[in-house]
Image (spheres, rainbow, N blue to C red):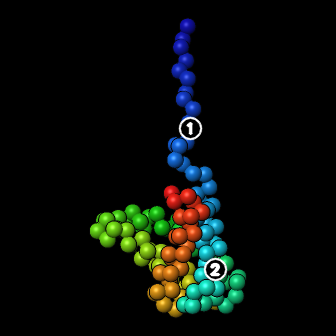
Amino acid sequence: MSKEKKKPKKVPPRDAKPGGVAVTFLCCLLGVPTCAKILPGIVAADVMASLQVGVLLGAAYLVLRPGLKVLTLPIGCLTLGLTNFAIDVGLLYGCAYLIEGFSVESVVSAIGTALLINGISAVAGGFR
């Protein structure tokens, strides 16, 4: 008689929140048009251009941002995480460069956009 070992069930950690990717993407998708309406330095020719930037920024947040955070980790420790805003501002400028009809006129408005999108994401994601 052989004893078969039962495989333990894979249970997600208690602090794991489902839908984190979707929340981040939707916050970027909806945050960019909102910032284009309320912040003076963010200019969109139409709603479609701001939605395109939102989609591109959401993809950049999910694909590029984690790698950039790892690369800048030593500097991020020295600046107490302020390099994360520099990464977000750089990603926003990159998306604005790629999409025609959308522009960021000043660094202050780009920082405001990054703060607003990160704030919306923190509230919607439950401060993960």
Q: Residue at x 70, y 84 (%)?
A: 47
Q: Give how far across and how far down residue 79 sits, in percent.
A: 32, 71
Disc 1 residue type? Val
Give the mark nearer the N terminus: 2 vs 1.
1
Q: Residue at x 46, y 86 (%)?
A: 108
Distance between mark 2 and mark 1 Cα atoms: 38 Å
Disc 2 residue type? Thr
Q: Residue at x 56, y 38 (%)?
A: 11
128 lies above or below 33: above
Q: Which residue is mark 2?
A: 34
Q: Quadrant of residue 22?
A: bottom right
Q: Give how far across and how far down residue 72 sits, in percent.
A: 36, 68
Q: Nearer the viewer, residue 121 or 71?
A: 121
Q: Residues within 10 Å of mark 1 (few under 14, many from 20)?
A: few
Q: Is residue 63 visible?
A: yes
Q: Give how far across and how far down residue 59 sits, in percent.
A: 58, 68
Quadrant (top left, top right, bottom left, bottom right) of the N terminus: top right
14 lies above or below 118: above
Could you tell whether 93 is left or right of 18 in the image? Answer: left
Q: Residues within 10 Å of mark 2 (few under 14, many from 20)?
A: some
Q: Nearer the viewer, residue 124 or 89?
A: 124
- Is label 2 in contact with label 1 (beta carbons under 8 Å)? no
Numbered disc in front, either 2 or 1: 2
Q: Which residue is mark 1?
A: 11
